[in-house]
């Protein structure tokens, strides 16, 4: 888990907009099959985000009115706040955290803060302030 849910798991108090999950390319078709009834946009390579912050392979779902974005961790580029594209590492630090009674793998606080600093959006800066 990454993004807003990871920030909330680390203590941010903002609303959750969607759920962001990262998987390995080798699991993409298994994940697609598992969630086939919830797909709103099938796997495709796209520039994504309100300000085109991400270049990645993405599968979009809608589960009980909650948007879920699943992306392949390989070949992800992030547009930094100063407009430069950088490669996202294919492995990220993660830790098990309890969310709603479930112990789930979540992007580590250190890794999440570094990622959110790169993006530098208002929501990212708010998350950094709340979880630091």
Image: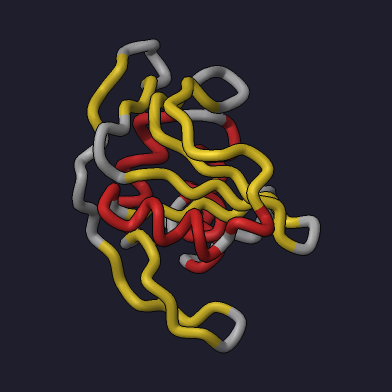
The front one of 84 and 91 is 91
Q: Residue furthest right?
A: 65
Name the image quarter holding the C terminus. Answer: bottom left
Which part of the image, by quadrant, shows the N terminus? bottom left
Percent of width and height locating residue 125 = 51, 38
The image position of residue 41, as x and y in percent, is 62, 38
- Position of residue 79 measured from the top left corner of the image (x, y, whole percent): 38, 20
Query: Residue at (58%, 32%) from the top-left corner?
Result: 122
Relative side of 117 to 12, left or right: left
Image-based side of 98 in relation to 86, left or right: right
Identify the image's colour scheme: rainbow, by chain, secondary structure or one colour: secondary structure
Residue at screen point 58% across, 55% down = 19
Question: Can the viewer see residue 15?
Answer: no
- Residue 68 locus on image (x, y percent): 61, 52
Tally of numbered discs:
0
Any part of residue 120 in sight: yes
Q: Residue at x 38, y 51 (%)?
A: 28
Q: Is residue 49 above or below residue 58?
A: above
32 sits to left or right of 86:
right
10 shown above or below 99:
above
- Vertical position of residue 132 compared to residue 122: above or below: below
């Amino acid at each position: 888990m990454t993004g807003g849910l990871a920030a909330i798991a680390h203590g941010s108090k903002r609303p959750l907009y969607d759920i962001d999950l990262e998987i390995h390319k080798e699991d993409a078709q298994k994940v697609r099959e598992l969630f086939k009834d919830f797909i709103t946009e099938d796997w495709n390579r796209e520039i994504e985000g309100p300000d085109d912050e991400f270049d990645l392979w993405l599968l979009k779902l809608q589960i009980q009115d909650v948007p879920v974005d699943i992306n392949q961790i390989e070949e992800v580029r992030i547009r930094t706040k100063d407009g430069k594209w950088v490669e996202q590492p294919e492995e990220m630090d993660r830790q098990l955290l309890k969310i709603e009674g479930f112990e789930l793998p979540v992007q580590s606080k250190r890794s999440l803060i570094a990622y959110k600093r790169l993006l530098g959006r208002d929501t990212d800066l708010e998350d950094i302030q709340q979880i630091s």
